[in-house]
Amino acid sequence: MPRLPLFVFGSLRRSESNHLCLAGSYDRCLEATLRDFRRVLAGHGFPTILRLPGAQVVGELFFISPRLYDATLRRCDDLEELEPGQLAGRFYRRMQVNVETVEGSFAAWVYADASMV
């Protein structure tokens, strides 16, 4: 799997409750926008994102340190209840998207609704 930065829009953001999964493990962070997705509250009570043309989700893009990449992504996958080596879990799917920043566009991982393909 590619080692992409991670786009987050909820509790993994800086100053949010689950940021400890990322704290101290990234080299830099940029404000970013994911287009054609919308943030919603899922049936399980937590925020998720779904495709919606014309919508956008604002979040943060974390460039994880190469030496800490695997362990950091594993912590985030555990938080989102993804089994080791899997991209989809009960509630979330880690998928590749393109996000926009002031430095340009980047391919990134995001945790989206498990129904996303």
Image: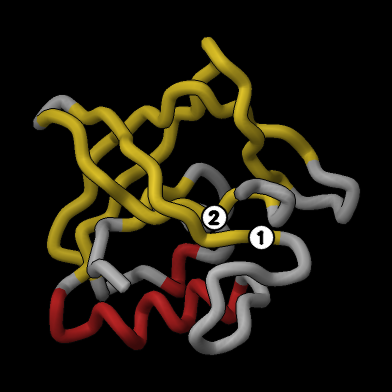
Looking at the image, residue 103 sits to the left or right of residue 62; the answer is left
Q: Residues within 10 Å of mark 2 (few under 14, many from 20)?
A: many
Looking at the rendered structure, the secondary structure element under dot 1 is strand
Vertical arrangement, residue 34 with respect to residue 23, above or below: above
Residue shown at 73% from the left, 50% from the top = 115
Residue 110 spot, x, y in % from top left:
46, 52
- What residue is pinned by disc 1? 92
Residue shown at 35% from the left, 43% from the top = 60
Note whether residue 96 is visible. yes
Looking at the image, residue 110 sits to the left or right of residue 42; the answer is left
Looking at the rendered structure, the secondary structure element under dot 2 is strand
What's the residue type where badge 1 is placed? Tyr
Q: Nearer the viewer, residue 18 or 75?
A: 75
What's the residue type where badge 2 is placed? Tyr
Residue 93 spot, x, y in % from top left:
60, 60
Residue 106 spot, x, y in % from top left:
21, 41
- What residue is pinned by disc 2? 111
Looking at the image, residue 55 sits to the left or right of residue 5; the answer is right
Residue 50 spot, x, y in % from top left:
65, 35
Using the numbered discs, state the Cα–Cα distance from disc 1 to disc 2 in whole angstroms. Answer: 6 Å
